[in-house]
Image (cartoon, helix red, strand yellow):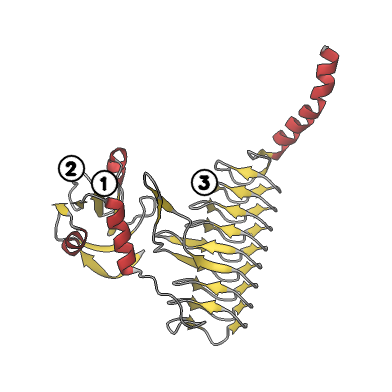
Amino acid sequence: MKFQTPISVKEIASKIGATIIGDDTLMASGINEIHKVTPGDITFSDVKKYFDKSIQSAATIIILNEEAACPDGKAILICEKPFEAYNSIIKENRPLRPLSSAIHESAKIHPTTIIEPNVVIGNNVEIGEHCHIQANVVIREYTVIKNHVTIMPNTVIGQEAFYYKKHETYRERWRSGGRVVIEDHVDIGPSCTISKGVSGDTIIGEGTKLDGQIHIGHGAVVGRNCLLAAHVGVGGKTIIEDDVTLYGQVGLAHNIVIGKGATVLAKSGVSKSLEGGKTYFGTPATEFRQQYRELAALRKLPEIISKLK
């Protein structure tokens, strides 16, 4: 998530009650989780074993709950509860704005785009040329939809990420500061759900086609010209490269990579990254020829046991 205008590290420290270690003249241009940070970003850690990873990342400002050595050109902010501090910065810069009308006045919709009845469009949404948004679609805040996109009925785009901080007796929702970005010539079927990123973007690449009842998790990136059949579920932060085909009811775990040109056959469960250019099947998914040989061998097992007896 990028701020509308940069914020000084001194101002941030004052608001979250933090002590500054390092360069107190820095300006923050955004805030992001550790795997999404770029120079100028704020990130945080409240677990000591991850301090070094946070400090050595591209982030410029790191919120911690203990003192640590600060590299040149960075600042560390020490406060008691880094997660609460991080979440408060998101909430201040991306406050919750409930809708009071079907289409928020800040939404930018190209005049060539068709909006059918009962569509709901949130604040700061952008929709490009020659799109077709069909009945009962909900498009939440800060979503970007480019040109020639079709979204079929009852789909929800840009809902809050399913992402919680675990405390001893409860779970606290992270405020989602990310977006959904849908590139040109994408088709999205009926009753799909696409979550926005926690702090970065969920992206559906140019020319990709989604069937009905598909879920795309927070911060996932789907490449160009992919084909996803009904009931596919994609875990948060997972990357699907270009020209991937996922058949019906395929489930992808979070934070994995599906290589370019891969095909995953129906009802497969994918728990680890897959190399591109191959076809996979099963749970856990493996190269389909190997999986079929294993299934054929398994069918012969009763006969083999009978002969051994």
Up/down of 206 relative to 286, above or below: below
Amino acid type of the residue that numbered disc 1 sits on in the rendered structure: Ile
Q: Residues within 10 Å of mark 1 (few under 14, many from 20)?
A: many
Q: Residue at x 34, y 55 (%)?
A: 37
Task: Measure the C-alpha gap from mark 2 to mark 3.
Answer: 32 Å
Image spot of residue 12 (x, y percent): 21, 62
Amino acid type of the residue that numbered disc 3 sits on in the rendered structure: Ile
Amino acid type of the residue that numbered disc 2 sits on in the rendered structure: Ala
Q: Residue at x 44, y 72 (%)?
A: 142
Up/down of 304 relative to 258, above or below: above
User: Are dots 2 and 3 in contact, CB under 8 Å?
Assistant: no
The numbered mark at residue 55 is: 1
Q: Earlier in the sequence, mark 2 or mark 3?
A: 2
Residue to which mark 3 is pinned: 256
Residue closest to the eye, 200 or 116: 116
Q: For the N terminus, which image quadrant?
A: bottom left
Residue closest to the far bottom: 111
Residue 120 visible (yes or no): yes
Label 2 element class: loop
Residue to which mark 2 is pinned: 69
Q: Earlier in the sequence, mark 1 or mark 2?
A: 1
Image spot of residue 202 (x, y percent): 49, 61
Image spot of residue 194 (x, y percent): 54, 63
Q: Residues within 10 Å of mark 3 (few under 14, many from 20)?
A: many
User: Are dots 1 and 2 in contact, CB under 8 Å?
Assistant: yes
Q: Is residue 45 left or right of residue 272?
A: left
Q: For the C terminus, which image quadrant?
A: top right
